[in-house]
Amino acid sequence: MSKPASLWLGSAVALALALPAMAQDADTVVATVNGTDITLGEMIVLREQLPEQYQSLPDELLFEGILDQLIQQTALAQSLEGELSRRDEIAIENERRAYIASVVLSQSAEEAISDEALQAAYEERFAGAEPSQEYNASHILVETEEEAQALRQELDEGADFAELARTHSQDGAAQGGGALGWFGPGMMVQPFEDAVTALEVGEISDPIETQFGWHLVLLNETRLAEAPSLDEVRSELAVQLQNEAVQNRIAEATGNAEIARNDEGIDPAVLRDQMLLD
């Protein structure tokens, strides 16, 4: 290749690389079916609505699959013979109403979890909170008081608590020697919690009855739990704030609406009368 030709080719490649990609927006037409356009925006929205297992597929595969689906749906919709039934029209309106309502609630939920709101909720819940007592305990669970008494006797005679739990306990903690880990007030059923709080570290309780059976409880350790950091409870507080915001938005919308109910005298069983839609 001559030098001028090679220079021209090199310049052309450099220019092509420097040019911006074709401008695209939500209204960019990606296909047309019998005069009906399918847009890039429609593809993006459909991808957002896909089940989680499809979201991680390669972009090339998703693009082709989504476009094919929209083309097929458009062609099928155009092939409808006659008019939609009354049932179908109502179903579409129900979907539309529900979607718009979900948009409103999503906006409220999103606005509720600003950094300022989360900080305020954290301070309201935890500011000045006293450290709470937490307990680390193990237990042996059996069906009858007689079994529990017999095991208590073995423990008094020097048997190992963890080994007896592995052999006799009838719950999921048995494999770990009866270990229940750390828990705080309100996390255990009342008779069990009352027994734990009355024990000294290293002490074993007498048999205790709960709805699960009969327990022998060993108190391993206690500690004072400080209030968690904001980061530790951020997700929990966000859910709380969002739930409150959603309920408040529903109450506000219905409270401000002019609502006239005309359901008096209607038999609830009419909901099952499909013939009303025919």
Image (cartoon, rainbow, N blue to C red):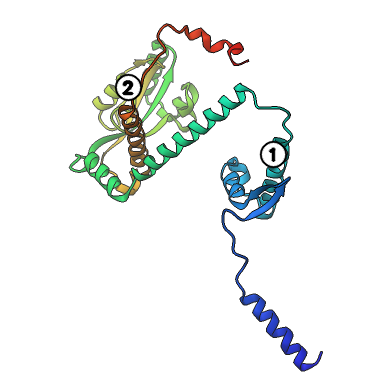
Q: Amino acid at mark 2?
A: Phe
**Dot 1: what SS?**
helix
Quarter holding residue 192:
top left
Residue 113, image x and y in percent?
34, 45
- Front-lying residue, 269 or 206: 269
User: Would residue 83 appear left or right of 90 to someone viewing this image?
Assistant: right
Query: Residue extending furthest bottom?
Result: 3
- Front-lying residue, 38 or 10: 38
Q: Amino acid at mark 1?
A: Gln
Residue 73's tag is: 1
Crowding at mark 2 (Cα within 10 Å: few <14, some 14-19, many 20+)? some
Between circles 2 and 1, the one closer to the viewer is: 1
Query: Residue extending furthest left?
Result: 128
Residue 192's tag is: 2
Crowding at mark 1 (Cα within 10 Å: few <14, some 14-19, many 20+)? few
How many discs mark residues in the rendered view?
2
Quarter holding residue 262:
top left
In the rendered image, the quadrant that contains the N terminus is bottom right
Residue 127, image x and y in percent?
20, 43
The residue under the point 71% across, 37% down is 78
* Up/down of 61 relative to 143, above or below: below
